[in-house]
Image (cartoon, rainbow, N blue to C red):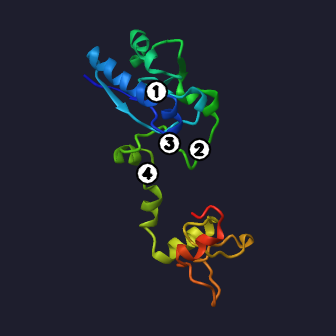
């Protein structure tokens, strides 16, 4: 028997409204009914008003239910939600929800979609694609590629060229600049939070 994959977010927003209790209730109810499931604790899709947003993998795609409390779980199983069936908390296929349908996710492309602890899931969703491409290049070509891409950011470096230059300190450092390896203790006093 193939286990039904059910996603329940485990990020702070979902947990703050009972996602842990919902996940435990789903596991308990599935075991009580002798239903084989694979419970995956993923990240939130960002629809915080629907958390905990539970998703069930079906042949037609992932189906969203939410917000799902622990008290809702027996009724969901009665309605065969683990097969993607109709229920008042059902919202249809997750990727067809208006909030998500027209988004182009970059930084958070995999959040909510994959099991964050599964390397196979990561690889199945283009994980390590950048690393694989970089391994085909010589070190100087990697630096040239990053420089040409326009990427910039702080990345732990404490001294920067002016923001208008768009370059990090390692890309072009003045001859008499302070090293990027300035100890954190030397700069902590500059910030009111004392981080």
**Left or right relative to 87: residue 30:** left
* Residue 95, x across and y down, in percent: 55, 30
The quadrant in which the N terminus is found is top left
The structure residue drawn at horizontal position 50% and vertical position 42%, both measured from the top left corner, is 111
Q: Which residue is mark 4?
A: 127
Residues under numbered marks 3 and 1 in contact, where contact means CB atoms less than 8 Å apart: no
10 Å crowding of disc 1: few (<14), some (14-19), many (20+): many
Rendered position, 18 above or below 123: above
Q: Is residue 134 above or below residue 87?
A: below
Give the CA distance from mark 4 to mark 3: 12 Å
Contact (Cβ within 8 Å) of mark 3 with mark 2: yes
Please tell me whether mark 4 sits on a helix, a strand or a loop. loop
Q: Nearer the viewer, residue 132 or 44?
A: 44
Side of 3 relative to 64 (left or right): left
Label 2: which secondary element: loop
Q: Which residue is mark 3?
A: 111
Q: Residues within 10 Å of mark 3 (few under 14, many from 20)?
A: some
**Residue linked to disc 1:** 55
Residue 150 picture quarter: bottom right
Q: Against 113, is 89 above or below? A: above
Q: Label 3 to label 1, Cα distance in Å?
A: 13 Å
- Gap between marks 1 and 2, in whole Å? 19 Å
Measured as percent of width and height from the top left, residue 16 is found at 51, 33
The Cα–Cα distance between marks 4 and 1, rounded to whole angstroms, is 22 Å
Q: Kindly state the secondary structure of the residue where label 3 is placed.
A: loop
Could you tell me how far apart the alpha carbons at marks 2 and 4 are, in whole angstroms? 15 Å
């Amino acid at each position: 028997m193939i286990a039904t994959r059910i996603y329940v977010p485990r990020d702070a927003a979902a947990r703050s409204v009972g996602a842990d209790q919902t996940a435990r209730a789903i596991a308990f109810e599935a075991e009580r009914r002798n239903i084989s499931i694979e419970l995956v604790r993923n990240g939130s899709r960002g629809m915080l008003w629907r958390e905990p947003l539970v998703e069930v993998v079906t042949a037609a795609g992932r189906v969203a239910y939410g917000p799902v409390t622990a008290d809702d779980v027996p009724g969901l199983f009665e309605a065969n939600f683990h097969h993607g069936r109709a229920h008042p908390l059902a919202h249809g296929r997750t990727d067809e929800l208006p909030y998500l349908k027209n988004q182009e996710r970059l930084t958070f492309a995999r959040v909510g979609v994959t099991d964050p602890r599964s390397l196979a899931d990561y690889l199945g969703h283009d994980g390590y694609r950048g690393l694989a491409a970089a391994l085909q290049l010589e070190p100087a070509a990697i630096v040239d590629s990053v420089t040409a891409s326009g990427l910039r950011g702080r990345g732990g470096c404490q001294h920067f060229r002016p923001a208008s230059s768009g370059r990090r300190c390692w890309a072009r450092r003045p001859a008499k600049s302070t090293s990027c390896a300035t100890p954190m203790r030397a700069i902590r006093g500059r910030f009111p939070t004392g981080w």
